[in-house]
Amino acid sequence: MNRALILGLLGSTVLGTLLGTLLGGCTAVVWRGHDPARTQPLRIVETACGQRLWQGEQAGPIFDGIAADGLVFDANGRPVYPAEIDDGWAVVRDGRPGKVWQALGPLIIDPDGEPAYAARDAAGWRVVTAAGEGPPLAGIYGPLRYAGARLIYVGGTAEGQRVFVDHRPGPPLDAVRQIRTGGGRVAAFGRRGEDEVVLVDGAEHGRFAEVADVQLDRHHVAVTARRDGHWHVVLDGAWSPGHAVISRVHLADGRVLYATGDADGQRAWLDGAPGPLYAAVHMVDLRLDPGGPTYSAREPARSTSTGRHHPWTLVLDGAPILTADDLGRLTRIPGGHWAIAARRANALHLVRDGAWGPAYHALGRPVLSPDGAHVAALADGGQTRGLLFDGRITPVEDPLDGTVAISRDGRRAGCVGRDGERWVFAFSDGTRRPFDLDELIAALTVTPAAQRPLDPDVAGILLHWVRIELERADR
């Protein structure tokens, strides 16, 4: 995230001044943040002797340097971080450094809450976990990851790059392009000579001229591969008919869903059977729910008294359920509840479980509570603009799209907006809580793994924080 984009998203004269001071000024604080519960402030402070991590008012030991981008939290919420010691690097936990290495890779936390990381010594690179050290390697490529309790990484050997699962190597490839997991299995694909090779659970699954993606569950392996100028789905080794695949393949409980497109239009395919032909299928909403395929699709043009237009149809569980002049992003949760912003007669409505709500001038993507009983969104009702929660708009100045959340108990909603010159967490009960702009800047550069959202952008980080703030016991 570059500074210009930060200013563009959060821009104001006051904020711009603060950002400029923070990014360009001289300060002893080199990083600041919070613990995972956002109850204790953290900061890394540089002194003439080195750097140290402060937890609230408690100071940690001084090191030559602290790699803020490696800071993570263990199962008890305690910080774990790499520190520079005597021209080497060690992992610090509870203020005590471990073994000193020549270099360290990023830290991650395993399913038991213990740190794991790549480290280099004179013998080469290896992966270090609570259970011990892996074999020495020429290099470790890409991040470490866990699929359930299984540790997965790519290591360099004399024969090429291999996918390691719990330190056990798979067949060599010239280069590993992607790793996929699903159904307790591990797949990878990459180049070997002139071919793209797909590996599943350490064995060769197939060879192709070009591979775009691999998806798998405990029933199927679906490879998206090119042949004769088109992308096809190769399901368990069998090529699909001559369709041009335009989406990723979705697998669930043995069922298979994807979309294709050609000059005639686009359609979804479920278990090898074609769905209706549409002018376009919205790929973002395409997914496989327990009842069947879910997606929104634009119908062919219709002639009306006001001209020709393309209405949109919402398809749930394989059946068309809603038609509107335009549709926003669908929100659907387990239990079958759903909500979407739909345009009809030049007004936006919140449609919830098929029921059309009042009209609004503007409406963001809705958010549902875990039980589906409550709904929130950013909305402009004409007289009031702000946070819509269960039909009532709480005024919020400049609310940020993508930051709306509902508390787990469904009693209140929150988002990020402005209160005069301050940026605040705003809640549906009218209360506000300011947040530290310095912390946001630090998070855009370095976000601890335990605080890192799925979307590595401003809205994604703030949404994660809103969810935490809604559950804080001191509210």
Image (cartoon, rainbow, N blue to C red):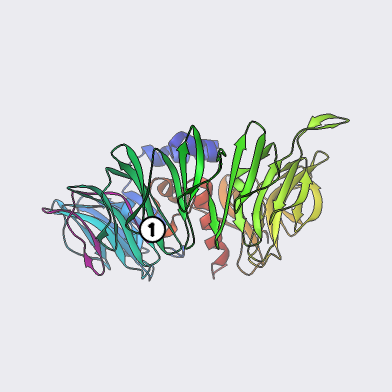
Q: Residue at the right extreme? A: 305
Residue 316 located left or right of residue 80: right
Q: Is mark 1 on a helix, strand or loop?
A: strand
The percent coordinates of residue 290 (x first, y second) are 62, 62
Q: Is residue 448 above or below residue 400?
A: below
Q: Up-down: is 207 above or below 333?
A: above
Name of the residue lying farthest toward the left: 122
Residue at position x 44%, y 58% from top? Answer: 451
Residue 419 appears anywhere in the view: no
Does residue 316 lie above or below 372 as drawn?
Answer: above
How many numbered marks, from 0 up? Answer: 1
Q: Quadrant of the C terminus?
A: bottom right
Determine the main secondary structure of the stretch shown in magenta. Answer: strand
Query: Residue 60, position in %: x, y?
Result: 27, 63
From the viewer's perspective, tell me whether residue 403 is left or right of residue 276: left
- Nearer the observer, 466 or 351: 351
Which residue in the protein does label 1 denote?
186
Q: Which residue is drawn at 78% across and 56% down?
A: 354
Could you tell me residue 432's position as x and y percent? 61, 57
- Residue 442 vs residue 364, the one in the foreground: 364
> Which amino acid, by three-letter code, is at mark 1?
Val
Q: Residue 202: percent from the left, percent from the top?
A: 32, 57
Q: What stretch is highlighted in magenta?
A: 122-146
Q: How crowded is mark 1: few (under 14 residues within 10 Å), some or many (20 or more)?
A: many
Q: Is residue 112 magenta?
A: no
Quadrant location of the N terminus in the rendered image: top left
Q: Is residue 363 left or right of residue 230?
A: right
Magenta region includes residue 135: yes
Is residue 164 visible to the viewer in this orientation of the structure? Answer: yes
Q: Is residue 34 above or below residue 277?
A: below
- Residue displayed at 61% across by 37% down: 261
